[in-house]
Amino acid sequence: MTDGADYNQSLKLFIVLSRAYKAINESSSKFFQEKGLNPTEFGVLELLYHKGKQPLQKIGGKILLASGSITYVVDKLEKKGLICRVASPEDRRVTYAEITEKGELFMSEIFPAHEKNLHELMTALSDEEQKQAIELLKKLGLSIKDLSY
């Protein structure tokens, strides 16, 4: 049986994690807005930029977005000329999202600035502390994934 002190520690950890995530997320969102994107649009572009064309049906799972929102985001990025839809030659049921040349150029300009922004946000922790945080948060996430209620 766990005592109240352990519960308080767990609650405090949750609050600290939530506040840290909120601060980092707000800073990143501001960066994306300055570039004319929202975080979801950036997520789709970043996926296509680094992984190449993707089936529309798979994008949501890869960037943690509800499948119903994918069409809307892809439409917006397509209107901006940053991505395009490509029908699969093998399966008519599958449509891919692919980054355009304009999208490649756009990402090649903003992605290094995004990386730099994240790096600056994380410099409050030393390299060793960042490694520890990565391992601890990975351990926490994997343990929760394995829990069954």
Image: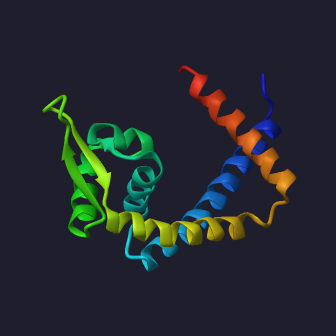
Which sits in the foreground, 144 or 34? 34
Q: Is residue 26 visible?
A: yes
Query: In which quadrant will I find the N terminus?
Result: top right
| Residue displayed at 70% across by 46% down | 11
Horizontally, residue 130 falls left or right of residue 82, namely right
Horizontally, residue 132 falls left or right of residue 45, namely right
Which sits in the foreground, 13 or 43? 43
Q: Is residue 57 above or below residue 112?
A: above
Q: Is residue 29 visible?
A: no
Percent of width and height locating residue 125 = 81, 61
Q: Is residue 17 above or below residue 125?
A: above
Which sits in the foreground, 7 or 141? 141
In this view, the residue farthest toward the bottom is 34
Percent of width and height locating residue 52 = 40, 47
For the image shown, how many numbered marks are present on the structure?
0
Percent of width and height locating residue 81 = 25, 67
Which sits in the foreground, 142 or 99? 99
In the rendered image, which quarter is residue 2 located in? top right
| Residue displayed at 76% across by 39% down | 135
Percent of width and height locating residue 20 = 66, 60
| Residue displayed at 80% across by 47% down | 131
Horizontally, residue 61 falls left or right of residue 27, namely left
- The scheme the figure's colours follow is rainbow
In the rendered image, which quarter is residue 76 located in? bottom left
| Residue displayed at 77% across by 47% down | 133
In this view, the residue farthest toward the left is 92
